[in-house]
Amino acid sequence: MISPRDGPALLALCQIMIRRLFREGMVVRSMLWPPVLTAGTLVGTMVVVVLLKSPATVAIPSTLSAELTRELTAAEFQLIWVDDPAAAVKRGDVWAGTDGTTLWLTQGDGGSVSLESIVRKHHGSAWRPVPPKQLPGADQSSLAGTTFVQIITILFALYGVVFGIGMVARDRDDGTLEAELSLPISRWVPGAARWIAGTLVLSIFLGYSIAIFDAIIGVTNPLQLMRHGIAACGGSMTLGIIVIGTAGTKQGFSGPLAFALTSATALFGVGFSALAIAPYVPLASVFAGGSGWSPLGLTLASGVLTGAGFGWRSGKG
Amino acid sequence: MSWATLVAMTHGLILENLVKRFHTASRGEVVAVDHLSLAVKAGEVYGLLGPNGAGKTTTLRILATLAEADSGTITVAGVDRNSNPMGAREVLAYVPAEAGLPVRLSPREVVRLFARIQGVTDGNNRADALLERMGAASYADMACGELSTGMKRRVVLARALVHQPQVLLLDEPTDGLDVHGRREVLSLIREQAEAGRTVILSSHIMGEVERVIDRIGVVNHGKMVAEGTLDEVLAQSKTSSLDDAFVALVHTP
């Protein structure tokens, strides 16, 4: 059933629900802190690593030629003299070692390429290091940024479950919902307003989190991640509202909350276990990749379903 | 004009043979409202009295379209509630026993929201005027979570009246109030009837409502066990006070 008042009522209730969410300090803090804390920790770690980074230590024998020793010192390698450089590397005493013709390394990175280059040049080798080709926009830091965003998305999706359940359970217990349902508007309106308000607020904070990570370390395809994130937030709101709605008043709060959180976690698991369908399913799609349009569409459909289910359940009294 | 139409026009609320059953795991089928019939005129305050679990709240929730009856007919200000629940909701206001005020919103925001949803012309000014009229202006911008029970009752009444409903349904309106709060709220309720509204209030506390009600319906186990003016109910129960009448009628010690 549709009433001419439904549209204005949906808008008014959405506005008031968003206002209520923003006035709850705990809600705002819970969404502001994860990206701020994670990004802050990341920047702090980077600063510490840069400031406290010690020069790479290379073990060499005393028989190494003086010329090569000078070249290594000029390249800012810290040298220690040992009888057996290979044994020193094997024991983990040093990161690298050389006897002038052979190089022993514990890991390959920019420093190892530089070291190998010096040794080869010393012997007149024509070898020139060729760095591996990188995919456009897929550098190491943006992959890390993407992982951080995926983790934040999981967190916000779990918030969505809590919001969905809390917004209905609390208003049902204190009579707010009854007061709204006694208004001359269709029964789906209060449920849909809660879904829209919760999804919007979560999406705003998710967008802000993605922007932070993109600014600090870069994020691969942020818009695609945003689509998956909105889908996850909306899907989790649907899950929360439907679970608390079908549970009824006698089930309380904790049981439905636990069930909905478990269901959300299971959907994330689908992202790893059912790769054929995961890109299309809200929540599961966060780790499955894809354009994000399909889960976004499904989430919007689930919002309509939430409103309809809420209306049906409310009509039963 | 038929007799039924005439009755519907003069009565704000008519219930006929209302029945509501619940199915519970422990007690099986429970009849919460058992062929309940009553009629309340416009400008009248009707007290629906009864012990806890008598079916008062269920009856009010059915009237407010928050629950569905198994059978029976209801007319609210001339509107058939069963065939036109949206129309019924336009002419009534329901005040649940719980205040239903979001803790983070102010009374002004709540009343203005309801005015906006009800499509009240110049809703903001009307909301403000009602809060003033209800004596809630001084705390209209405080958070509802900071209000006392009495303050909340005034706000809830302002919220209910913002669209000038013809029928006012009040569930335990004095519950949790002190003596002063009860008197003030009951006085506000009386004023609504004098303004021509049909008022039906439920209560399980007899003495406090007898000053404002015109007629009483005493329900027990969902059935009407006595109905009439205060004097008529006292005569039916052969007692001298409403408290005694209540005890006699519902057979509780």
Image (cartoon, grey):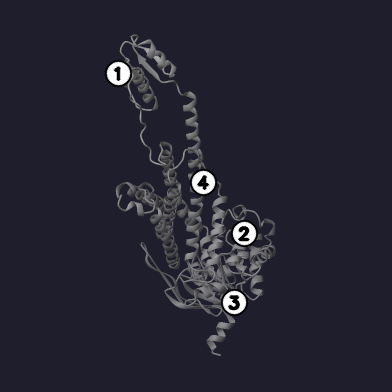
Q: Residue at x 56, y 56 (%)?
A: B102
- Amino acid type assigned to the residue bearing label 1 in the image: Thr
Q: How packed is label 1: few (under 14 Cα within 10 Å), some, or many (20 or more)?
A: few
B147 in relation to A84, above or below: below
Query: Label 3 is found on which chain of the structure?
Result: B
Q: Nearer the viewer, residue A185 or B164?
A: A185
- The CA span between labels 1 and 3 is 111 Å
Say what secondary structure mark 2 lies in: helix
Residue bearing the label numbered 3: B229
**Neighbourhood count class around disc 4 (C-alpha, 10 Å): few under 14, some 14–19, many 20 upward:** some
In this view, the mark in front (4 or 2): 4
Read off the residue under disc 1. Answer: A102
Residue at 50% across, 62% down: A190
Which kind of residue does numbered mark 4 sit on? Tyr
In terms of depth relative to the viewer, which is nearer, B15 or A225? A225
Circles 3 and 4 on the same chain? no
Q: What label sits on residue A208 in the rendered view? A: 4
Residue A295 sits in which quadrant?
Answer: bottom left
Q: Give the residue number, with chain letter if any, for mark 2.
A: B109
Q: Are marks 4 and 1 in contact (CB under 8 Å)?
A: no
Q: Is residue B14 left or right of residue A115?
A: right
